[in-house]
Image (cartoon, coloured by chain):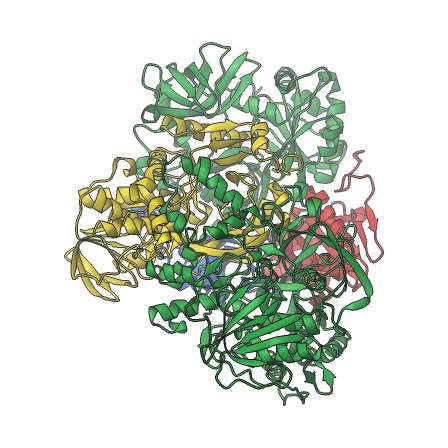
Amino acid sequence: MIIDHPLLGPRDAAEFTYLGDAKLIDRPDWQSETAAKDFYEYGYLRDNPAGWHQELWFHEAGDRSWLVVTRNTVTHEISKVEMARDVARARGRSK
Amino acid sequence: MHDLQPMTALGGDAPQVDTFDHVTITENDGLALASVAARMGHEKTCHTTLKKLLGAVPEPGKAVLHDPEAGFWMGPDQWMIGAPRETHELLADHLKERFGDTASITEQTGAWVCFDVIGPAMPDICERLCAVPIRRMTAGDAQRTMIHQLGCFVIRRDNPEHIRILGPRASAGSLHHALITAAHSVA
Amino acid sequence: MRYSGLKVIKEALTGHKGWTPAWRDPEPQPEYDIIIIGGGGHGLATAYYLAKEYGQKRIAVLEKGWIGSGNVGRNTTIIRSNYLLDGNEPFYEFSLKLWEGLEQDFNYNAMVSQRGILNLIHSDAQRDAFTRRGNAMLLNGADAEMLTTAQIKARYPFLNTEDARFPIKGGLAQHRGGTVRHDAVAWGYARGADSRGVDIIQNCEVTGFRIENGKCLGVETSRGYIGAKKIGCAVAGSSSRLMSKADMRLPMESHVLQAFVSEGLKPVLPGVVTFGAGHFYVSQSDKGGLVFGGDLDGYNSYAQRGNLPTVEDVCEGGMAIFPAFGRARLLRMWGGIMDMSMDGSPIIDRTHIDGLYFNGGWCYGGFKATPASGFCFAHLLAKDAPHPTATAYRFDRFEKGLMIDEKGMGNQPNLH
Amino acid sequence: MTQVNRLPGGQIDRSQSCKFTFDGKAYTGHAGDTLASALLANGVRLMGRSFKYHRPRGVLTAGSEEPNALVELRGGARQEPNTRATTVELYDGLLAKSQNRMGSLRFDLLAINDRFSNFLTAGFYYKTFMWPAAFWEKLYEPIIRKAAGLGSLSLKDDPDVYDKGFLHCDLLIIGAGPAGLMAALTAGRAGADVILADEDFVLGGRLNSETLTIGDQSGADWAAEVVAELTTLPNVRIMPRTTVIGAFDHGIYGAVERVSDHLYAPDAGKPRQVLWRIYTQKTILAAGATERPIAFENNDRPGIMLGSAIRSYANRFAVSADKRVAIFTNNDDGHRTAADLHAKGVKISAVVDVRPDVPRSLDYEVLHGEVVNTKGRLGLTFAEVRLADGSMRTLECGALGMSGGWNPNVHMTCHQRGRPIWNDAIAAFVPGAELPPGMVVAGAANGDLSTAGALQGGATAAKRALGLKGRLPKLPETGDASINLKPFWYVEGCSRAWLDQQNDVTVKDVKLSHQEGFRSVEHLKRYTTLGMATDQGKTSNMGGLAIMAELAGKTIPEVGTTIFRPPYTPTAIGVLGGRHRGQEFHPKRLTPSHKWAEEQGAVFVEVGNWLRAQWFPQAGETTWRESVDREVLATRKSVGVCDVTTLGKVDVQGTDAADFLNKIYCNGFAKLAVGKTRYGLMLREDGIAMDDGTAARLAEDHFVVTTTTANALPVYRHMEFVRQCLFPDMDVQLISTTEAWAQYAVAGPNSRKLLSQIVDQDISNDAFPFMACANITICGGLRARLFRISFSGELAYEIAVPTAYGDALIRKIMEAGAQYDVTPYGTEALGVMRIEKGHAAGNELNGTTTALNLGMGRMVSKTKDSIGSKLSEREGLNGEGQLYQVGIKPIDPKDPVPAGGHLMNADGPVDAAHDQGYATSACYSPNLGHAIAIGFLKNGADRMGEQMRLVSPLTGVDVKVEITSAHFIDPEGERLRA
């Protein structure tokens, strides 16, 4: 596969390491009353769709950026690649 | 001054040179290296200092082949600066002075082995080593990629027959072996 | 019809006119006592044991395509019970024991071949871990033997012990492990289940569950609604897709695992060998093909195909330990979809919906589990209580922190 | 033997003779021949045996789809089984043997199977061989395995090397027949970066096998002229002998270039083959078509071939398949074969055509009818023909061409999700709508079976692929026409009519399969093995499908095909492995003291990709234990030195660096003073211990974090995840510096004295206390880092210098330490000392243990958020019955306490149900004079002093042990702080 890196252009997916569902960005609040359940669901449950999937890839043999790749798990087509840091900020993560 | 003698990455007193009909592979032991990473909120100042130092800020996938300091992009807001070791043994310290609190500086001299591959067979050799589009790269293109499972930087120099490869120093021997066998294959 | 050598001879002499279909092709009835969704190895085995061991009647297996067209038809055929952890080892040993009597039990030669499996050891730490595992196997009543490099070399003289990047320092052998003709497992169970009255309904895709007041009443299918008292799902690779129709999110991801077969060769490999410092395992089929594989491609996928880097990675591993294989040719490669669970171990459990039961998350170890998986799922469906060897395979183990993590990789499915 | 079947003309080089042997017999052919054409030229028709019935087999095709003429090529370690004689370029000295026979090829003892074929029908083995159960492995299976298989491996290491490479282009063209050449010409002239790959050694595809003309040239001359022009274009890379094996995601194609297979042996240093990974924007598939046979009784005898193959042999290789040739056809193509052969003076026994309106010929007899049977034990002698009027004719012939129509080579269009669609006009599957992205199909592969169509299709495809504007260039005139095919798959009433010639699948087998309920194509394939031969079904599938469809009362497209999968043709496993063999399987990582350690005679061990000194044997030491004991004792007594460069090191800088460490470590780091180091335990988010190490605070905004050797990469990846994805606004910068610093542990009571001679500053206990760290200089000015940390439990330091000075430093340490008998120690002694001290390492951090298990439960801070803290609170990871790390020592000091042994209650049963825990790491402690181990025990913290059994039935150990603290030596840590 080829991942079109937002900064570096098309790169062989073999240069990347895969983590999984980009929902792993949405780490729960440790002080919430439902933290135990939230962390269980965050850690263990997955939508696992047959179709479009946002997922985290790490450019291990490249610039060490984490990327959010929107990829179809049935066709492997990739429709969007973003810097994970930008996505995380857009989803409200900070310090 | 101390009396400790450095050793080259391939374990010699002097850099190794391998000559083939159409290419020469030279271990380049003369580079001092340090990384520069912009501190959050200081990106602009950091860019200004970089520009003063190199003449330009290396863009993603690019190197600025400046003298005596040269630099290439490593990652978002992170660059590698190189300079001749003879004159810049304390490159990291000097950079820290120049950048102050606008950047995090880390000495990298010892982390890398550098090979210069020069000759008309260079593109053929490159094609047997890594996935960079070597024939489409021009002077100043710098890509990190995998060679023999090793994360390496491949930098296209001014001489169109010259490529510089930086690889992890501990695996200098394995990287060298890969370069030599590729040179034999295409010779 | 009972299969035997005598029957084959009789038919050969009378023009093979007497052979009948191995299973019927019935129309679905409006209602069953138990429906099994998924006509793969696990589903067919479940139906078979429900009928044979648990005296259940009115059972249907619903298969969206052709039986055996999922993972039971696209794996590397290995059986073994060389597990470490309490939650796993008794179950897989139970499975191996079922394999040992399977063919006589269901009157079908699935070519269960106990030719032995060998895990190579390359470091002292690996030896310590394999020692612990071998002891766990023995303490659970399975067989295990630690072999020296010399003993291994005697059996595999062409193994690369001279020029190996990671020297072979021994191996953990399970002699009762081996291979099985994978398609025949599906066919054997199907034939056995059919002959005991189970309706095997092919080309019948489940499109939804009818759930009322927390109870599952039946399934919507491409061939209409079918009611049932109990519904068991055994659709490896499609588990998340199916269960999402019941609004369930599962602790698993779907990944592609590639497998490979070479052209036919005269016998070279007596048993199964796994390479512990690379990503490679291999056996040789009775037809002569080297059947081999390695790691997952590593990304979520429902496409039954993989990519080149993994192909190369696997073959690099093969060439590292068997440099003589270089001149054999890879004939075919394919991919199967694995429902990789969060701890690398399966789930056989009730769901929170009354009457809806689940069997899945087999990662890439589902084939060897087929008989025990069917047996235990049948037990659960028939008695509403887990079979004694499968008590740990619960849904709630993640929330409770009772993971069964053989590889110690944690909640990242592609690492198991 | 002379080349009795050699014809005039052709494209062989008659000036160059090649001597070769087949089954020990010497023959001569010419350069430009294949092994198959040379054998045929020499009158050899019998080339192999079939898989199951060991029926005599000759060549069926003239290409890579050959299922029959498989040989063991070359000898010795280069022996290459199952090699298609049809693709082997003849070279001088070629050596080939027939295979899959017991005895000689002519008298194969296993040919007896054919007599029993009625018993050995499809799936017979599923129904028998079940009694007694043990006989399968002992009796039946060995016999079956021996009889099965095809060729044999030498089982010697493959002596050749293989390369891998990477190519980038705008347009990849697969196949250099008329369509591919025209596409290459169009794209090449337009300036695009083009790769043109073809599996053959001569480009031109079918043009080389036909007599038709293009413009005023022969097809072959036209092809040669186009190739000559393409060669002059710098933007076109022509790759003959290169098979594109698969279409992978996003425009990546795998291709195998056979660099040296046409040579006696590869030139020195040169690869046998190269696996290219081709990255392309667009692809034109111009892979041509494959002719299909017709099923009739005994259609498998040597001499019975595809009509197009007979034509290839005649036109390209100047070989007649035999003196007398008959043709059996359902289309005009068969007549071309007859006409070409007749023109070359070969006797045509007759052309048998199933079509009522049979084209007439003045040159040879044309019969309307069907071939219903053949004769000839080791080769065809007669064909029996039933004419349309019902009368029978016997044709004397040594070769029979079957022309059943053409199947477009659509394989690569299906390597992703595409399924082919049925085309009635040519009665074949053609590419469907869903192609791999970027792919265009042209020529015969697209179902366009005429040369004119191929030329036009190639040019159009190139323009489409590249988005070129303007009109098509003027294409040369060609002289072929449509083939007027009447679909015809098998002769009514036939039974032992072969569909899959290699696997011996006959019409009868397909019928039986259907009778037994195996009615989907996948069931048919799996039950009968149809299409699973080495030709991957290229010559067999369609016939089977057609019969299946008829039996099921369906059309062929309703029945569908099985899925085409890579590789396009079988591919050497060696080339897929490339250079990554032997010592080059993985790169090596060497520490800075490697050369020095070699000089000391060190024994090395693999730790991941690192090679580390395991121990340093000295003269007179006969076992490794002697060396290790000496190293341990010397270190604890005076001072030792160990290369610890391999530990992962990450530079963490930034104003939020301390907050960042607070997130990744479960224990607190915010308050760590500058100049101090702290042990840190890192959890995964699931609450399990991930890694441990130290973090040294060199400045307010600068930490150096160490990881274990094994986890350096995953920990770095994890830290970047936390930085970029979870806390993107933290001002923190990370970079790995593992290889930038050479680092040595100097341990033992004299370590301070030793280092005082090297470092340029005061390192007295007051000036540089336990857990201190600093940037320092050594030897009068070299920059260095010093950490007062200890893994051994002794007074110890770790000292780091830039890697290039690592060799100089170890020599300096040895020199300065000579007066204290400084002893280098390896990983074994390191391991002994850490077990004596009870430090957890990889065996304990096995991915299932928690902080609590490791005895560090209280380290997990409840007052801050850190990765893993929440999920570590789950009930199953806490409370009664948890494992705790303990020490294990034998009651009898002579007993071993093996790692991997399981702990059992002293008086309880020994079985899995009563398992109490296990030993993780063990060693002999030279300080204590007996073996010790650490391990995990249920409720272990409360069981100190308890006597238990440690059992390892695997290794025959069952010993009494005592549970102790894991800190065997200096439990109070006084030495550390000395």
Q: Colour of chain D?
A: green
Say left or right for D737 vs C256: right
Please name the residue shown 66% across and 22% down the image: D640
Say left or right for C143 vs D839: left
Q: Name above or below for residue D526 compared with residue D426.
A: above
Residue C317 at x, y = what percent? 58, 45
Chain shown in red: B
Chain shown in blue: A
Residue placed furthest toward the left: C213
Q: Nearer the viewer, residue C382 or D908?
A: C382
Q: What is the quadrant of the N terminus of chain D in the image? A: bottom right
Q: Name above or below for residue B185 compared with residue C270.
A: below
Please name the residue shown 62% across and 52% down the image: D106
Question: Is residue C396 in view?
Answer: no
Q: What is the quadrant of the C terminus of chain D in the image? A: top right
Say left or right for C188 vs D576: left
Q: Quadrant of residue D684?
A: top left
Question: Is residue C52 in view?
Answer: yes
Q: Name above or below for residue D397 compared with residue D636.
A: below
Chain shown in yellow: C
Q: Name above or below for residue D505 compared with residue D816.
A: below
Residue C234 at x, y = what percent? 30, 52
Please name the residue shown 73% across and 58% down the image: D262
Q: Nearer the viewer, residue D408 or B39?
A: D408
Residue D685 at x, y = what percent? 41, 44
Q: Nearer the viewer, residue D350 or D155?
A: D350
Q: Quadrant of residue D281?
A: bottom right
Please name the residue shown 34% across and 68% down the image: D552
